[in-house]
Amino acid sequence: MSASSHIILGIDPGSIIMGYAIVTANGNTIELLKMDVLKLAAYKDAYQRLQIIHSEVCNLIQTHRPTMFAIEAPFFGKNVQSMLKLGRAQGVAIAAAMQAAIPVTEYSPKKIKQSVTGNGNATKEQVFKMLQHIIQFEEKPHFFDATDALAVALCHHYSTSSPVSNNKKTVKGWKDFIVQNPGRLKTPSAP
């Protein structure tokens, strides 16, 4: 792997189905290494699901040694319980990446669709078709969660390799966040 190439792990978080994709990116060359889903519906205990998500992300990291980690941010829906479950699933996946000291970047669903298709309101089918065109893979996954994860990885590649990108700093932990954002630290006021 050359100095300019990266292995990107993209995650589409979910508490029932989590999509993941691993790509190597070197300039304009993107190669799909693995794309699949983790199915969790068989596990009724929510905490067991979270443990499995964490364990699987750790296994993916150990096996593929990604240098970058990108994840889809939760969308704001009306069902608060669904949002909490999704946020927890996202949190344990992020924790696995941070534990391995891999920089984490989060993207909104609209930003991901925009970067892949040019349309922030694209359907999952449109994203899938564009990904097939860009990366040249034939198989159609049984779940769009896998191709959504691939779109997350591709979005991250585009965002970090673009000459016009803002080179946003990534955070490797709370200490790093505090160092990069001293003005956001709030101290409690004395009584």
Image (cartoon, helix red, strand yellow):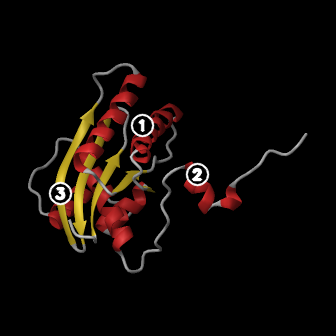
The quadrant in which residue 134 appears is bottom left
The quadrant in which residue 120 appears is bottom left
Residue 125 shows in this picture: no
Residue 84 or residue 10, whichever sits in front: 10
Q: Work out how far the residue at label 2 is from the one at label 3, CA to CA, in angstroms.
A: 33 Å
Tell me what residue is drawn at x 23 percent, y 57 percent: 23
Q: Tell me the residue that label 3 is attached to.
A: 32
Rendered location of residue 110, percent (x, y): 41, 59
In what element is the residue under mark 3? strand
Of the two numbered discs 1 and 2 on the same chain, state the one appearing first in sequence.
1
Which is closer to the viewer, label 2 or label 3? 2
Rendered location of residue 65, percent (x, y): 27, 51
Rendered location of residue 20, percent (x, y): 27, 46
Of the two numbered discs 2 and 3 on the same chain, state the one appearing first in sequence.
3
Q: Tell me the residue that label 2 is attached to.
A: 175
Rendered location of residue 74, percent (x, y): 46, 46
Q: Work out how far the residue at label 1 is from the one at label 3, CA to CA, in angstroms.
A: 24 Å
- Mark 3, residues whose alpha carbon is within 10 Å: few (<14), some, or many (≥20)? some
Q: Amino acid at mark 2?
A: Lys
Residue 101 shows in this picture: yes
Label at residue 89: 1
**Quarter of the figure with the C terminus:** top right
Of the two numbered discs 1 and 3 on the same chain, state the one appearing first in sequence.
3
The quadrant in which residue 55 appears is top left
